[in-house]
Amino acid sequence: MKKQLITIVLFVLSVSAFAQEWSFGAKLGMGSYNMLELKNFQRYRVRQNDLPLKTTESYPVSPVYSAEIALGNVLHLDKIGIFYTFSSTGSRSTISDYSGRIDLDAIVNGNQLGLSFLKNFYQQNSFSAGAYLEASYLFSFLKGKDYFEITSPAKVTVEENYLFHSNGAGAELGVAAAYRLSPISFQLNLGYLHDFPGKLYPEGTKDQWLAIENSEVRTAWSGFRMGLQVAYIIKSKSKN
């Protein structure tokens, strides 16, 4: 990750001399996720139990949080930036009655670090609209917990935890509309993220990876993204 971060920072610094303004923004959005292989993995976990567990959550739509530092009006683009995005979703299968309880939980966290590009195709007064592209390094963590509790005749609890990680990449393409009330800008975006996931390795090793029935299990963050960004804009000092 350090190499990717250094590369991104060096790129932005190399073009910063041409920027007419800087912006610092935070974005709150929502994301949908494919997660097909992780959904199959959860079904596999349920099948390993003889009891009729019910899946109450299966990687639903959830909030997405982003922060961005960007340069404005540079290299024929309206914005080039460095961004970080955090996403999280999960699954739960459970059953409980008077004799005890079973919970099979899985939480997957996604972290994106990359470059964003925006080109406006329409601009009038304070309003603008255009297209954007985000290219990112994407690293994920899958946290699982199996919880078993028996209450009769004596209370007994067993808890098993596991952690997997993966490295991959992502590309998000979409449209954005912004309204500027200097020095504040409000930007609404709608796009689609396609990810290129890596294998899920157990913590501390890369000699093994997660698989079921000889089929690899990977994250799949691909899905629609929608968000609202609020940014503070600083004009660059004029050069003599």
Image (cartoon, grey):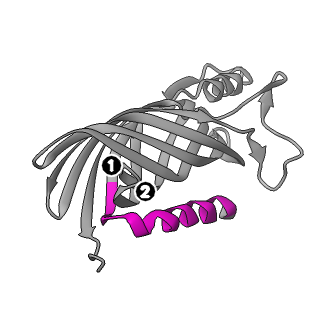
Disc 2 marks which amino acid? Gly
Judge by depth and name the residue closer to the eye, 201 or 193.
193
Question: What secondary structure is marked by label 2?
Answer: strand
Image spot of residue 107 (x, y percent): 57, 43
The residues colored magenta run 3-26
Image spot of residue 49 (x, y percent): 71, 24
Residue at the spot 21% in from the left edge and 51% down from the top edge: 186
How would you classify the magenta stretch by its main secondary structure? Answer: helix
Q: CA distance from mark 1 to mark 2?
A: 17 Å
Residue 193 got which mark?
A: none
Judge by depth and name the residue closer to the eye, 115 or 146.
115
Q: Quadrant of the C terminus?
A: bottom left
**Is residue 105 magenta-colored?**
no
**Is residue 8 magenta-colored?**
yes
Which residue is labeled 2 in the image? 81
Along the horizontal axis of the image, is 68 left or right of 138?
left
Image spot of residue 39 (x, y percent): 60, 25
Q: Residue 108 is drawn in which quadrant?
A: top right
Does residue 58 sit above or below 79 in this rendering?
Answer: above
Disc 1 marks which amino acid? Leu
Which residue is labeled 1 in the image? 28
Along the horizontal axis of the image, is 29 left or right of 206?
left
Residue at the spot 20% in from the left edge and 43% down from the top edge: 128
* Residue 144 visible in the snapshot: no
Image spot of residue 79 (x, y percent): 36, 53
